Image: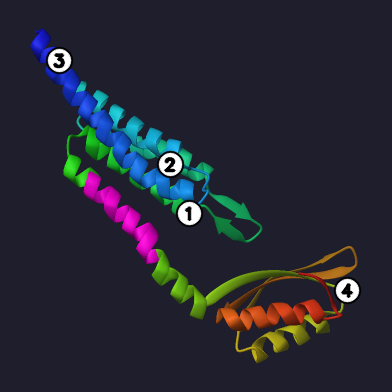
Amino acid sequence: MPAEFFHIANADLVKIAVAILCGGILGIERQYKNKTAGFRTIILITLGSAIFTLIAQRAGLGVNINVITGIGFIGAGVIFKDNIAVSGLTTAAVIWTSAAVGMAVGAGDYLLAIVSSVITILVLTLFRILENYIDEIHHDKLLSIVFTDTNYDKLLSLIDSIKMHQLKVNVLKVSMHSSCLEAAIMVTGHRKNINKLDRELLLMADVKSF
């Protein structure tokens, strides 16, 4: 009995160690980029998922899919919506993936867990280079512009100016506030053209702030 107990305990310790290792692999990238869910958080997610899976298997329930439902609450907590822009989606996806990795460890599939962790890191790092290149030639920027008065013609004039910079423009929201016209505009195009537009906006007398 003691030998069997120690065998089970050692197997559990190996799973805990692998869960911490995989969580560390995923978490260190998030920590390096100063994301909300960092090194310790991701480790705890993989560890917790592995432990829940172990408990479910001991109870004869197999793999506990409810872990995915529970981890959704944590993922939702790192997604932020600021006016129109949304941030934190990648971190939420990493949290979701970390839970899956932890479940794989708890189920004893170490190879799947480690390979998945490495692939996730490659996606987050190497694919970032490709993403940056695409973003350079096809960049989206949300501009919140406040004009000096409520003259709508000034907005139309600005739209024409944006198009002259070889940029696509989409007016998302127009409102009045404190006797000033405010507009949320999404511009799309090459980053260097958007930078030129920024410099031009700084010199526009009709633009109060942006």
Label 3 is placed on what type of residue? Answer: Phe
Find the distance from the CA under tag 3 to the CA under tag 2: 35 Å
Q: Determine crowd level at label 4: few under 14, some 14-19, many 20+ residues with C-alpha closer than 10 A.
A: some
Magenta segment range? Answer: 114-127
Q: Earlier in the sequence, mark 4 or mark 1?
A: 1
Q: Determine crowd level at label 1: few under 14, some 14-19, many 20+ residues with C-alpha closer than 10 A.
A: some
Which residue is labeled 3 in the image?
Answer: 6
Q: Earlier in the sequence, mark 2 or mark 4?
A: 2
Which residue is labeled 4 in the image?
Answer: 148
Residue 119, magenta (yes or no): yes
Please, is residue 55 above or below residue 113 in the view?
above
Pick whichever, 88 or 115, lies toward us: 115
Q: Residue reaching furthest top? A: 1
* Residue at 47%, 39% in the rendered image: 74
Label 4 is placed on what type of residue? Answer: Thr
The nearer-to-camera label among 3 and 4 is 3
The nearer-to-camera label among 1 and 3 is 3
Q: Earlier in the sequence, mark 2 or mark 1?
A: 2
Label 1 is placed on what type of residue? Answer: Leu
